């Protein structure tokens, strides 16, 4: 499995080298070189922050399309609960199911039901895992990648529960295969995604060699067709419908609301997540057992390939969730318990390794890394400390690091360049005053 696959890519022809994206990237993965942004694949966590930031639309998310459905005999859509926040006020899950069927899918399985399964698995995981604390939700793959790249010491804190997407994919593929006698490989499962990081997780799943999802289709790509189909008002039923609490996972705080536990904390927005993880890393955060951390503002409703304003979408998702809670109650617990009895809760856990990913360390060899750090500090002390970004690196420290790694030179800094030009100009001026030996006079006048 390709652990370095990335869904976020640069459209070089659109990039103007404006440097806007380099400062927003949470892992300092972007540099501007020769007038174009360059993404370092070792550092990128596919958070999509640069997709949101780039006004020239030069960053894109590579996803599947409806055409890819043709490869499979039976096609299942697994829509992210965030989709319910995108399609206008009052649109109900049954209408969305009908809309997806009319786009060419043969069945729909709600990822909010996968969230109900994940909720129960997480409760059990927290109960039987007394340490370390706090545990950190693994639901957002951008956050897990962030931990792999930037906070590897926190990897033991990641709760090893499969995401709602994988739970829904696994269940629906098995059920369709068993009940209709279709070989599992002929069943295509497609996630309808607001999220770039989940597109990556489909290709390179966490702690697993195989993916239960065959592709991810961006909400923004099917929004027009889906809106038209939904407008008919016709409804249909999914293979599994999620509870209101499952739907609520789409917004920040939704997972915690579903868990219903105390001593928990929710954080959203990748830069807020970083601040909080720094507190966990340094041991300053105490008395918290579980953290829900989502990379996108307002949660998955704010994913980079969604269409609606995240805060409007969050309100819509809450309306759908509250509607479901008051109409039919939150209770999918019997169905979830039966599934966990049948398949075993370990079927919904991340059993493989979640390794630390290199990308930020200066060298694998500790001695060399320490020596390079010394050089870096020296170079940095000589830079102006303005973090202007004109050199194409996000900060002066990042430029110092690039210099030490041999990927940039001191004169990429325009202040150092100006200093060097002045020195050269003074040298040249000195030379203009110097007489050629043949022209000089003995008395020096
Ligand atoms: S997707 Fe995120 S981590 Fe990757 S380059 Fe863009 S901002 Fe940086
Ligand atoms: S918050 Fe949700 S949409 Fe955003 S990166 Fe994480 S999982 Fe994806």
Image (cartoon, rainbow, N blue to C red):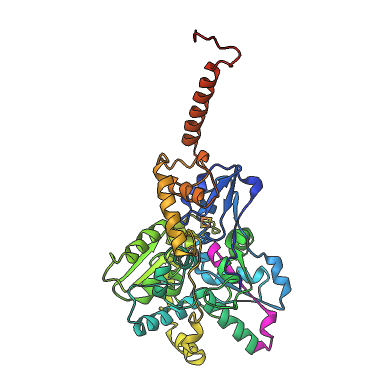
Q: Residue 28: x, y in percent?
A: 48, 53
Which range of residues does the magenta coloring cover? Answer: 179-198
Residue 89 appearing in the image: no
Of residues 338 and 64, the one drawn nearer to the viewer in this rendering:
64
User: Looking at the image, which residue is at 46% across and 81% down?
Assistant: 117
> Hey, which quadrant is residue 153 in on the image?
bottom left
Of residues 182 and 145, the one drawn nearer to the viewer in this rendering:
145
Q: Residue 189: x, y in percent?
A: 62, 75
Residue 189 magenta: yes
Image height check: is 433 above or below 297? Answer: above
Tell whether 216 sits left or right of 93: right
Image height check: is 378 above or below 65? Answer: above
User: Looking at the image, which residue is at 41% across and 56% down?
Assistant: 271
Of residues 402 and 161, the one drawn nearer to the viewer in this rendering:
402
Total marks shown come to 0
Q: Residue 10: x, y in percent?
A: 61, 52
User: Looking at the image, which residue is at 52% across and 79% down?
Assistant: 167
Residue 221 appearing in the image: yes
Q: Residue furthest bottom?
A: 342
Q: Residue furthest front?
A: 442
Q: Residue 11: x, y in percent?
A: 64, 51
> Hey, which quadrant is residue 239 in on the image?
bottom right
User: Looking at the image, which residue is at 37% across and 76% down?
Assistant: 259
Q: Quadrant where the N terminus lies?
A: bottom right
Residue 248 magenta: no
> Hey, which quadrant is residue 34 in on the image?
top right
């Amino acid at each position: 499995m390709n652990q370095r696959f990335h869904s976020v890519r640069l459209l070089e022809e659109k990039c103007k080298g404006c440097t806007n994206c380099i400062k927003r990237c949470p892992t300092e993965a972007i540099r501007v070189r020769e007038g174009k942004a360059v993404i370092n694949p070792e550092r990128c966590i596919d958070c999509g922050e640069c997709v949101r930031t780039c006004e020239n639309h030069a960053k894109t998310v590579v996803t599947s399309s409806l055409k890819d459905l043709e490869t499979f005999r039976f096609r299942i859509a697994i829509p992210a609960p965030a989709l319910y926040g995108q399609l206008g006020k009052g649109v109900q899950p049954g209408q969305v199911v009908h809309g997806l069927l009319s786009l060419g899918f043969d069945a729909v399985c709600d990822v909010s039901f996968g969230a109900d399964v994940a909720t129960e698995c997480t409760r059990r995981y927290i109960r039987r895992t007394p340490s370390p604390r706090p545990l950190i939700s693994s639901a957002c793959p951008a956050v897990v990648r962030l931990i792999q790249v930037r906070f590897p010491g926190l990897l033991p804190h990641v709760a090893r529960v499969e995401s709602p997407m994988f739970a829904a994919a696994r269940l629906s593929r098995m059920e369709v295969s068993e009940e209709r006698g279709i070989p599992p490989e002929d069943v295509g499962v497609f996630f309808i995604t607001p999220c770039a990081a989940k597109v990556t997780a489909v290709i390179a799943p966490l702690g697993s060699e195989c993916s239960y999802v065959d592709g991810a289709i961006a909400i923004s790509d099917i929004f027009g067709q889906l809106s038209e189909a939904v407008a008919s008002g016709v409804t249909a039923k999914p293979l599994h419908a999620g509870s209101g609490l499952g739907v609520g996972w789409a917004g920040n705080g939704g997972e915690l609301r579903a868990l219903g536990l105390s001593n928990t904390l929710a954080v959203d927005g990748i830069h807020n997540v970083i601040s909080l993880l720094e507190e966990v890393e340094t041991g300053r955060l105490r008395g918290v057992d579980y953290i829900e951390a989502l990379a996108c503002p307002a949660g998955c409703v704010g994913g980079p390939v969604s269409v609606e304003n995240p805060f409007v979408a969050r309100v819509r998702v809450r309306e759908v969730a509250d509607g479901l809670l008051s109409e039919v109650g939150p209770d999918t617990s019997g169905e979830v318990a039966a599934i966990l009895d049948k398949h075993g809760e370990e079927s919904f856990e991340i059993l493989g390794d979640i390794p630390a990913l290199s990308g930020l360390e200066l060298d694998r060899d500790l001695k060399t890394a320490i020596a390079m750090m010394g050089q870096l500090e020296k170079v940095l002390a000589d830079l102006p400390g303005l973090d202007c970004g004109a050199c194409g690196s996000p900060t002066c420290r990042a430029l110092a690091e690039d210099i030490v790694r041999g990927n940039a030179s001191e004169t990429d800094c325009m202040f150092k360049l100006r200093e060097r030009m002045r020195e050269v100009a003074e040298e040249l001026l000195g030379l203009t005053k110097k007489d050629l030996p043949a022209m000089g006079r003995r008395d020096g006048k």
